Amino acid sequence: MIKTENVSYVYQPSTPFESAALKGASLEIEDGSLTAVIGHTGSGKSTLIQLMCALLKPTEGRIFIDGEDITAKGADLRAVHRKVGLVFQYPEHQLFEDTVYKDIAFGPKNMGLDEKDIDERVRESARVVGLKEKHLDRSPFDLSGGQKRRAAIAGVLAMNPKVLILDEPTAGLDPKGRDDILGIIKTLHKTRSDMIIIFVSHSMEDVAKTAENVIVMNDGGVEMHCSVAEAFTHAERLQEIGLNVPQITLLTDRLRSAGIKLPEHIYTVDYAAKAIAGLVKGGDGDV
Amino acid sequence: MIKTENLVFTYEDGADEVLSNINLNIEKGSFTAVLGHNGSGKSTLAKMFNAILLPSGGKAYVNGIDTSDEKRVFDIRRSAGMVFQNPDNQMVAAVVEDEVAFAPENLGVEPKEIRARVDECLSAVGMTKYAQSAPSKLSGGQKQRVAIASVLAMNPEILILDEPTAMLDPMGRKEVMRTVKRLNREQGITVVLITHYMDEAAEADRVIVIDDGKIVTDGTPREVFSEVEKMKSLGLDVPQVTLLAHELRALGVSIPCDTLTVDEAFDALVSVLGGEARD
């Protein structure tokens, strides 16, 4: 479990440029959960995940991972970095080895694993992200954009992290590439029952399709931390704080306020289609 | 305004064609969105429109000028301005108004005229308030609007935008799209928008879909998006309400297949289900 206790972070403290990016965030994220973090630019979401990976040290407050205080003096940061894998934005810019295999192997190699374990982890991680054997011997620079990104994710997975954090994993991808990455996240969530997965997104539609829970950040604070279904019942508030609400939620909300008896929490097209078709077929009696 | 004739592009002789046999005519004052998955050739095509790349075969004309005419390359780039995905790659100055003045200064425009153009262009993108700010202190959407203003300062007739909102959050995306639409409507600038966002393409007059270097679909957003299966098979999406209409039709509910906006879907569904119509 990840727990943050009243965590604040101030950039450039005691200077004229001082600015508080995070103001007293308290959160608990359960083992085996799949959580999206959403918020407009400058809402504090990137600061929050960098704190969880111990890339930043909070100005105030404490962070615990599996009960261990990673913000304590003398905390073993190397251990934290192994436990918490971070996939940066545009991670493909960090590929550097001459083959995909070596790139994925870089993390486990640095962990001091033996050749056999490294080989197993490389192949397993490549498989999970949908890269084929033939890709492993290629230069990462010969892969397509979506494949490169998957190779970069495999490199983090090969470290076998307990917590996987992805910062805008679908930015700049086309719809198919985006769905591929979201599919990988969902599969990981299903197959690794213990893993905590957190991804940052700008798209409520991606959140609706993929996550169980959502953390909505606004102005350095946690605005909501709840199930995705519950978050969408606050569609108006989400729009107020600069987030987009899926078209389908806008539409069904309006239909409901026009007196059409649709269920609340509609945020996927499939569900909306079934609910509406049900009403039509049910005839006047049910409506 | 932009015309291509049997345009072909390959990176080296004998290599696979990145663009093959593109015949296109983009009208003055129109707003065209170009869709296609990564690697489809859409950015390559955009680069043909201001002579960053030249055809390996066939012709591209911008404002009647053949883009292969080396002597006219500056005329082409002045009339077709380009905005890229990452505004940070495009910024050169430390102050917003210097950034906007950069192009006209290099074109040798009179200082007085430069001042007028900078003010006008910043106002056109709603960034007058930030004239003295440092670009590094702006949000992504603001930076992208400054990038647009810097291109406008050359008085272009065509604005080519290559995924200008890919790195922006929803607010930034709205700011940029509102600006682009206004420039198109009020100033009559011809817009070519390359995007992965179907809702942005839905706002254009015309949508062109590129796949494997060829134009596979070309029509109004309504025509293009109503072909849900085809768009999916091309690795693309359609707006959520269009998909909803498609799924409802499959479930036997009669609703137009070319529903494009929330308003249209609302009206169609109210007439099927009853309820109070929109004001």
Image: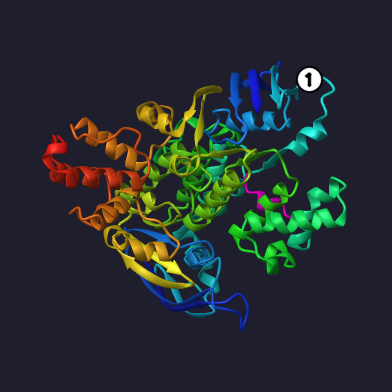
User: Residue B165: where, in percent of width, then height?
Assistant: 48, 47
Residue A191, given in percent of the width and then of the height, sits at 61, 47
* Mark 1 neighbour class, 10 Å CA radius: few under 14, some 14 to 19, many 20 or more: few
Three-letter residue code for mark 1: Ala
Q: Which residue is mark 1?
A: A72
The residues colored magenta run A89-95
How far from the left and from the top, in percent, is residue A208?
Answer: 44, 40
* Residue at x 17%, y 54% (from the top left corner): B254
Q: Is residue A93 above or below residue A7?
A: below
The stretch drawn in magenta includes residue A90? yes
Q: Is residue A129 visible?
A: yes
**Residue at image coords 48%, 67%:** B45
Quadrant (top left/top right/bottom left/bottom right) for the C terminus of chain B: top left
Query: Quick one: SS at disc 1?
Result: loop
Q: Total marks drawn?
A: 1
Location of the N terminus of chain B (image quadrant):
bottom left
Residue B126 lies in quadrant:
top left
Instruction: Give B154 or A63, whichever is nearer the viewer.
Output: A63
- Residue A205 lies in the magenta stretch: no
